[in-house]
Image (tube, rainbow, N blue to C red):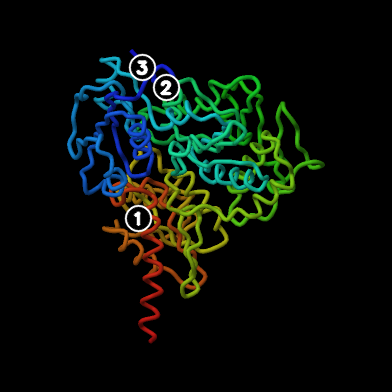
Amino acid sequence: MPLKPFLIQDFELKGRLITLLGLGRFGGGVAAVRYLAAQGAQITVIDGKDEASLTDSLQQLESLSQVKYQLGSETHELPKTDLLVVNPAIPPCHPLLKNAEELQIPVTSEMELFWQLNPARVIGVTGSNGKSTTTAMIHAIMQASGARCWLGGNIGISLLPVVDQIQPDDWVILELSSFQLEALNRIQASPQIGVVTNFSPNHLDWHQTVEHYRESKQTIFRWQTQNDFSILNADEGELQNWSAAGKVVRYGAAPDTQLDLLIKGEAFELTKQNYTILPHLNVPGMHNRMNAAAAIAACTCASVEVAAIQVGLKNFEGLPHRLQFVGEFLERRFYNDSLATTPESAICALDAFKDCPIILLAGGSDKKVDLTDFATQILKHSKATALMGETGPVLSELMYNLKERSDVNSSTVISPQQTSFEAAFDWAIRQSGPGDVILLSPGCASYGWFSSFVERGERFVKLFFELNARMRDSTE
């Protein structure tokens, strides 16, 4: 029996008992609680993390008297409730979801609530890699065009608190994770313009199978109409077999040169004669040119003029934690790519600096994906690699095994397993020389050592500035 979807038009929230499962630390849970409280609901928040771990989120809710909490322990039975609101990180196998299914209690999420209340047109972006940057590029272009637009979703911004300010003629640009799309499938929702940057196995600790991960991602097109747009990366073989109800638009590298990107689709065809000239980008790497091509395709479908596309991309400075230039120290350049939580993202980062000696910080928590290609590219591109976290030993074994093969010639220095992030950072400094790039691009999630990729990236930046401070102190 499937989970019962929640349709907001059929449900009066005032006075209802509502349970929120997973408050989290990224704002979506807080936004959902505040919205539900404003509607007059009585709310119980359940989270396996303790109060100390959720301090920032709890402080934002301390003025709400109608909220009760069950924190720091696991429970297998729901309290008496009329509705269950689920954080995207809660896996489908969670016992309270099974409980809701048995009791036929309707289930929703922050994204489903927003979607049903949002009056505006939506550009949605998903993919295993590149979705955050592509989403931000689209938003930058839409801003340059003068359109009234809103940025949110998995990029870390909940739009639920401002949904009453959004107008029908606005554009909402959402980064959509597989978790959020799985939820949107319950209410049969897809964006008017959907973008898929690429596809590779990811989050298998949550989805359990590649098939379930794929089905969740395909929600971005599943409920479109024939008047909507389905934008796909033509260079991704997997995506060529995806079905779409909307007008299919494909973007990719032109056959004659990687620097001349083409976009072709049933709705329009952009060729060398009328294609927007891709401006110089402030973010490095061929993968970012592909992200820009996806953004151009989406904005062209939204009838944005060429001049605005050029201005928006030219002014785009990149995202924090995504190939973010932190600074230079003793002729070494430091880049924070903590948002690279998949092997494919980290491989793109290595490729972006392929002409430079790279000292890499890699590894983290295990999402049960194959790291062989990542290990191969580390050996190919890095001068030295500091191995961290749960996947550190896995990467180490893979790299040493690959080094023993006759077809692999690598002088990469492989660190012992690092016991802390600070130790990994210091080891990387010791291996570096003038002209090197010191790159945090872990290729794995942050959990275990950090609460999020944001905390991990901020720690890297903090250590860099402490390094500079130590140098100043030693010369005074």
- The residue where tag 1 is placed is 387
Q: CA distance from mark 3 to mark 2?
A: 13 Å
**Residue at the image position 57 percent from the left and 31 percent from the top:** 120
- Per the rendering, the mark at residue 137 is none
Q: Amino acid at mark 2?
A: Ile
Name the side, left or right, on which 151 lies relative to 368.
right
Q: Amino acid at mark 3?
A: Lys
Image quadrant in which you'd find residue 456 = bottom left
Name the side, left or right, on which 231 lies relative to 185.
right
Q: Secondary structure at mark 3?
A: loop
Identify the image quadrant of the C terminus: bottom left
Image quadrant in which you'd find residue 42 = top left
Q: Is residue 57 above or below residue 462?
A: above
- The residue where tag 3 is placed is 4
- Per the rendering, the mark at residue 8 is 2
Which residue is outermost to the top?
1
- Marks 3 and 1, the one that precedes in the sequence: 3
Tag in front: 3 or 1: 3
**Residue at the image position 32 percent from the left and 41 percent from the top:** 24
Q: Residues within 10 Å of mark 3 (few under 14, many from 20)?
A: some
